[in-house]
Amino acid sequence: MEFLLASAGPEIATWKTILFGLLLVGLVLCLAFEEKLHAKKSVISGSFAIVCLFLGAVLNILPFEDVVVGSHEAIDIVASEHSDGAEPSHASHSEQKLEGEVLHQVDGHRQSVTLQVHDEHADEDVQHGAEDEHVNVGGHRLSMPVFIPGIDWSVIAIILGSSLFVDVTSKSGLFTWIAIRVTKVSGGDPLKLLFYYGVMTVVFSAVLNNVTAMIIVGSLTVVSLEKLNRREKLLGFLLIEGLLTNIGGLLTLISSVPNIIVGTAAQISFVMFFLKAGPYVLVATVVTIFMGARLFGIHSLKTAEEREEARKQVSGFDENDGIASWGFFWFATGMLILFILVIATTSILPARLDLLGMGFVALTFAGIMLIRYKSQADEFYRSIDWDLLGFFMALFVVIYVMEHAQVLHAIGSGLQLVVFHIDDSFGTLSDASVLLAGSAVFSSVTDNIPLAAMLANILTTLGAPTAAAGTESGLWWAVVFGANLGGNLTPIGSASTLVAVTIMHKHKLPMSFANFVKAAAPFAIAHILMAVVYVILLIQVTRALS
């Protein structure tokens, strides 16, 4: 039997990788000087996406095969030396004459290949090295632009669906009602209000996705501060909440995609992940809130007169004022609760609905809510932040090209050079520190999902101990913390921080790329330093208990 498999792709020359690396640096610099360029983020990222695609095609680094969908696994090839001359063992289809387009799994990526089976006598030279390969057949071919698979449509769907859902739900008066109730509980004290919203942000980010959490909490914050006539504090509140979304994303195994990637590779259970990440999240949340309060001048009311005046002010608020229809209010309340529950449990939905993802959930709930305003739906479409969606789509395209140009691989390889002592069961303190800081820096300018995947693959290849061995290496935790916390260094480091900046712009608050980095730097540095100390403590405690 003879298998002719297409190669994984052409070798990328070093100068090409450097060229695209410089383009990535150029994108970051242009975004940093967005205001001076007088250009929207979508235009900047879109321009770089066009250049990257053009060069990717000209320099032959992009795959242009048709996408094959609906295929199924046909053959499980198990290579062996066959020193005794016995016939190799194949799956049930191995002796059939098959010829046509199939998909071949190469380094975690499905690639279109050609499978030819000439006869039942295998050519052992071809078979050699094919261990554990899975070949899929069937399905049909789809011809689409090369950049379409590069866009994470799930993220786009989540942003679009969540935004529409929140906009329509807000018409019920629900968010105003919640905001006023929270404001009343705080007694009008800005510091208490910041604490309540900070905790709400972390909890929502742990059970929802970060983007949805930021959209919901940001909407509530705007209403509360405007009711208190403290709009000047809005920028500080939104920035702190944006940073806390990435802190909350560390709390559970399913709070973020990097957690899932690294946690699965390290075989860390849901409960163990929560127990080990929880203490850091608690401390980091408190530190972030009080740092933010100090840096942005958000103080507690000091005198009895101030507190009494604030109580009188909030007592005059009527949370029922914005409710035009109690029927729609209770319907929206039920839908919001259901939305949170379904988003939080998407991965365990029955009847294969889990495969549709959170983007489908967000769009479905948005569609249901739009039925209430079916004749005015176009008004909600006009309020969508198309610049944000355009920016993300173009950014995904750039990162997609960077991945094929081996830029992300070079980043991973660079980090691999600093991990010299993998033979240490738990990772040395210096290696863990450098790996955490390095992954945080790189994830601040690139998508943390492929970065986390590469680093997880590197640690697996180097033999880092997993939880299955009794206890996992501290290097796994260095990647988890670094990949998540890097999003706090720049506004493009994570989707939720970019949403926070977008909300600021929507309410005419000045916040450029450079200003965000300047304002967020103290928090991000503190978060990363605390994470380094915490991972070192994890390693030390693990060693002591082993």
Image (tube, rainbow, N blue to C red):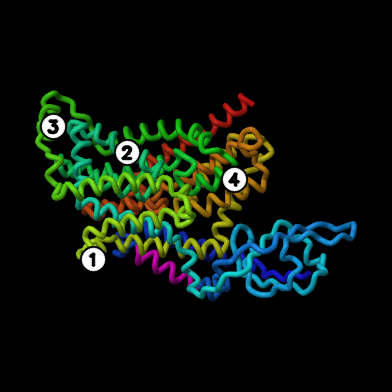
Instruction: Say whether residue 150 is magenta.
Output: no
- The quadrant where residue 131 appears: bottom right
Closer to the chain start, of discs 2 and 3, is 2
What is the C-alpha distance between the residues marked 1 and 2? 31 Å
Q: Residue at x 25, y 32 (%)?
A: 192
Residue type beneath disc 3: Ala
Q: Quadrant of the C terminus?
A: top right
- The quadrant of the image that shows the N terminus is bottom right
Q: Residue at x 84, y 57 (%)?
A: 81
Which mark lies nearer to you, 2 or 3? 2
Question: In screen coordinates, is 106 left or right of 234?
Answer: right
Q: Residues within 10 Å of mark 3 (few under 14, many from 20)?
A: many
Could you tell which of marks 2 and 4 lies nearer the N-terminus? 2
Residue where numbered disc 4 is placed: 265
Residue sitting at x 61%, y 24%: 544
- The magenta-colored residue range is 42-54
Q: Which residue is mark 2?
A: 200
The numbered mark, 3 or 1, whose residue comes first in the sequence reads 3
In the image, residue 294 sits, relative to residue 494, either above or below, namely: above
Residue 113 picture quarter: bottom right
Residue that mark 1 sits on: 378
